[in-house]
Amino acid sequence: MIRPVKSRPSRAAALNVLLDRLTLSGGLLVLPLSLLLFAQWPLRDLVGAGSRPANDLAQWLFALYVALALRHTTRVGGHLAVDALSARYPRRVRERVQRWGQALCVLPWALFVLVSAAPMAWQSLRGFEAFPDTGNPLYFMVKLSVCLMALLVALQALLDLRPPNPVGPE
């Protein structure tokens, strides 16, 4: 009896799966974020305390959520795109324009943001920077989220450079 050989996924495929799981799990941040944003009014007007810490916590959760969501949106093609002209192109041409557009437009900007924000984020992390108005901790998470967003978008642009794998016989 001949058994089919199971091939291991490529490193790029494994990285894509890992990033997909990371960004999809980031979607769960919407729940505490929504709760914190909703709780600000009652905390301020009914309780008389706690609205500013709730706002600070919501800010860094939102920054983290956006960093993860931007990569996911890019991955699934949910971002704004110019379809007026490309809708008439053959599918293969659209795929190539998408791949190389990511490499020529998105990748350089993501790398620029990553390189220019990294020293500021590192300094903020080293000092465990707090929110300036309230002194509440975790302001450094907002700055780290910028670096995370740039890193994830750059990785996705690099992964998108690879041509799609043709479907082989099963």
Image (tube, rainbow, N blue to C red):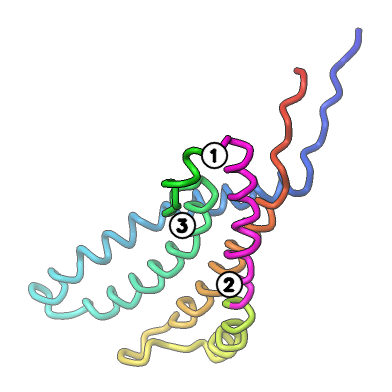
Q: Of the residues shown, which amino acid type is indicated by label 1?
A: Tyr
Q: Position of residue 156 (x, y in %)?
A: 62, 56
State which tag comes first along the sequence, 3 or 2. Answer: 3
Q: Nearer the viewer, residue 130 or 119?
A: 119
Viewer-closest of 124 and 51: 124
The three-letter amino acid code for the residue at tag 2 is: Trp
Question: Within 10 Å of the Cα at label 3, are there few (<14), some (14-19), or many (20+) other Cα atoms?
Answer: many
Q: Which residue is mark 3?
A: 69
- Image height of 90 relative to 28, above or below: above
Q: Quadrant of residue 157?
A: bottom right
Marks 3 & 2, CB-CB < 8 Å contact? no
Q: Position of residue 126 (x, y in %)?
A: 59, 88
State the CA–CA distance, disc 3 to disc 2. 17 Å
Q: Which residue is mark 1?
A: 89
On residue 109, the disc is: 2
Q: Is residue 7 above or below residue 155?
A: above
Tell me which residue sits at (59%, 70%) in the image: 110
Q: Which element is circle 1 on? A: loop
What is the secondary structure assignment of the residue under circle 2?
helix
Q: CA distance from mark 1 to mark 3?
A: 28 Å
Q: Residue at x 54, y 91 (%)?
A: 127
**Counting residues from the N terminus, which is met first, the one under dot 2 or under dot 1?**
1
Q: Which contiguous range is marked in magenta?
A: 90-112
* Farthest right residue in view: 1
| x and y, in percent, of residue 31 in the image | 33, 55
Image point (72%, 27%), residue name: 167
